[in-house]
Each structure stands twice: as structure tokens, then as C-alpha cells.
Image (tube, helix red, strand yellow):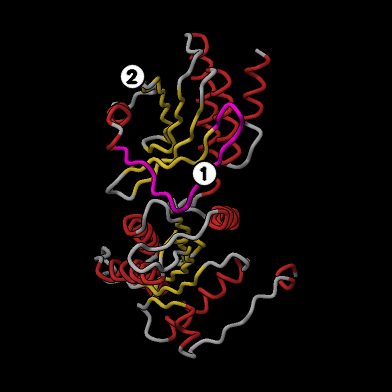
Amino acid sequence: MESIIKHLVEITGHRDHDLLNISVASSLRELLNAESTRVLDVLSNGHQVLLKPSLAILADGVRLEADAKSVGEDLQEIPVLRDGILARKSVIEQHDAQGSLIWLPIWNENTLQTVLEIVNPANQNVNTMEVVNGMLVVYRNFQNLLDYSERDSLTGLLNRKTFDDSFSKILRNQFLAPPSTSSADSEEKHHWLAVIDIDHFKRVNDQFGHLYGDEVLILIANLMRASFRPRDRLFRFGGEEFVIILSSSTAAEAEHIFDRFREHVAQHPFPQVGTVTISIGYARIDQFEPAVAIVGRADQALYFAKNNGRNRSCYYQNLVDSGDLHHEQANDIAEFF
């Protein structure tokens, strides 16, 4: 009983998804005396469901596996797990010559959020599994509370207050690993930050009302989910402003992805409103620059796009190189005041 209480206290003592996942994965490995446990984030862009390992717990400790350059495992390639999820099973098992696997899907209503994977559990009696099931109920409820606090209530995108933490984690994951290159042209891949603003959004609210304005915001968010990859991070900053952190792309890829999204929005029919366009400003994420400096550069590129015709996607460095913008070095000390 003391061990169970200890695990529950540890699980509910965190206000961060990563720490919560470490706690539950560690508790499951210990309770089931397993070889290892993994936390698999479920990512979907509407066409494909990917399982991306966020961490693994081994007998000798924690191994973080969050790799921004990793695409993840295609759910279609794991038929036992896929079929179990479609049947809404709470416990999915696979036993073969290579060993045993248990998968525990974690749902938020009708949305699959996480899959916990347990490798070669040695202690799988009825009493232990009852404790595990109770622990998962606590974990799911607590995870949903954290998720609720991190997401925009209207669009379901990540909200502004989670941005700084997400940005720090992305920097850590990106720069602990060696730079990757494109096989086609050996160009380095980087992360990119884009600020997006809906053109003439005030006119939409004034002419059609705030209900239609909200519908435009929701549709823009849905188009974002459909247009970007599962590993990219999508935020609503408030009002008609959105932010995207684009993972591991060359400059040419980033230009293509952002401009393709701009075109998707311009070509999408918005009920009652008709045509809606967006302007995009984006900048490369550099290791030694604070988030506020990178957002500021993307903002400058956005303002240029809005002041020069709108319905444009502008890259900060291209504008500096052409003389349209003046580069200002970030002052780290000033950011404290």
C-alpha cells in the first residue's frame, strides 16, 4: 500500500507533461518489473497516425528520446496495436518469440493522446493489473488537466503561455544533436518560427459578427493541422495571431511549406465570409538567440508582408539581405527589464 501511495503522490506532484510521463513510466516499470517502458506520443495530421517516443525508462534510469528530427513509427505498421486501438481496448498485448509487449492507450474522450508501452513485464498478476488500471485513471485525468491548461479553448491549439517552455525544449533537443543535412543538396536543416496574422480580421468581425469571426479562427486552426507535419508545433497567441514552430527543414523547404499553407487558406471557402487571406513572417531559430528576439524578427517580416500587399509569406533574412529590413542584434541583458 505504501508503494502504491508513493507512486500516486509522485505522479500527481508534477505540473509538466514530461515529468508526469517520467513518473508514470517509472512507476509502471517498477510495479510490473518490466525490462523497459516507453511513452509514445500520438501525432496525427489527418492522413497518418504516428507514434513518437518521448522517453524510455530502462532498468538503469531515464533515457530521453524526444528527437525533433525523428518522424515516429507509423501505427499502420503495428497491426496488433492498430486493431486494439480501433476496438478501443484498454490493454493490448502481443506475445511472440521475441518477448511480450503490453500497450496501454490513453484517451481524452474520443482522442487518443498517448500510448504507454511495457516491454517484457515479469509481474503481471490480477492484483497488480488492478493497481495499474487505477494508476492509469489518475494519470489520464491529470494529463487531461495539464492539457486543458496548455491549449487554447477555442481552437484547441497550444496557447501562448506554453510557448516559452516548448521553445526551450525544442532548442535543447535540436542543439544536443548534430545538425542534419538534406541528402539532395547537403543544406543544413534548422527549426523555423513563423508568426501568422489573418488579413483584415477586424473587418470580418465588424461585417459578419464575432460568431463568424470565431468560425474563421477555428477553420484556420484546422487548416494548420492539415497543412503541417505532426512534429511541428502550432500555437494561437490570441486574437487573429498564430505561431508555428517548424521542425528540421531546409530554407527552401520552409519557404515552400509556409507559402503552401498561405495558398491553402486563400483558396479555402469560408462560409458566409468567402475568401480569407493571411500574412506570414518567419525567421530561423538560432541556438544563442532568446525566443523574444526570434519572435521579434518574425514579427518584422510579418509587418513587412502586411504593409506590402498582404497575402504574402516573407523570410526575415531575405528582407535583410535585400535591404528592406535592418538587422538588429539581440540584447540579452535588455530582455530582463
Total marks placed: 2
Residue count near mark 1 (Cα–Cα under 10 Å), binned few <14, some 14–19, many ≥20: some
- Could you say which disc has been placed on residue 96 in the image? 2
Q: Quadrant of residue 64?
A: top right
> Which kind of residue does numbered mark 2 sit on?
Asp
- What residue range appears in magenta? 57-75
87, 191: nearer the viewer: 191
Which quarter shows the C terminus?
A: bottom right
For the residue labelled by badge 2, is the local secondary structure a helix, a strand or a loop? strand
User: In the figure, is residue 252 to the left or right of 318?
Assistant: left
Which residue, as the protein is rendered here, is positioned at the far bottom? 323
> Which kind of residue does numbered mark 1 sit on?
Tyr
User: In the figure, is residue 52 to the left or right of 15?
Assistant: left
- In this orientation, does residue 118 appear? yes
110, 286: nearer the viewer: 286
- In this orientation, does residue 161 appear? no
Q: Quadrant of residue 78?
A: top left
Q: Position of residue 47 (x, y in %)?
A: 27, 48
Q: Which residue in the protein does label 1 denote?
A: 148
Which residue, as the protein is rendered here, is positioned at the far top? 126
User: In the figure, is residue 218 to the left or right of 128?
Assistant: left
Q: Is residue 99 magenta?
A: no
Residue at image point 35% right, 43% down: 50
Is the residue 273 above or below the residue 308 in the image? above
Residue at image point 45% right, 89% down: 322
Q: Is residue 68 magenta?
A: yes
Residue at image point 33% right, 73% down: 277
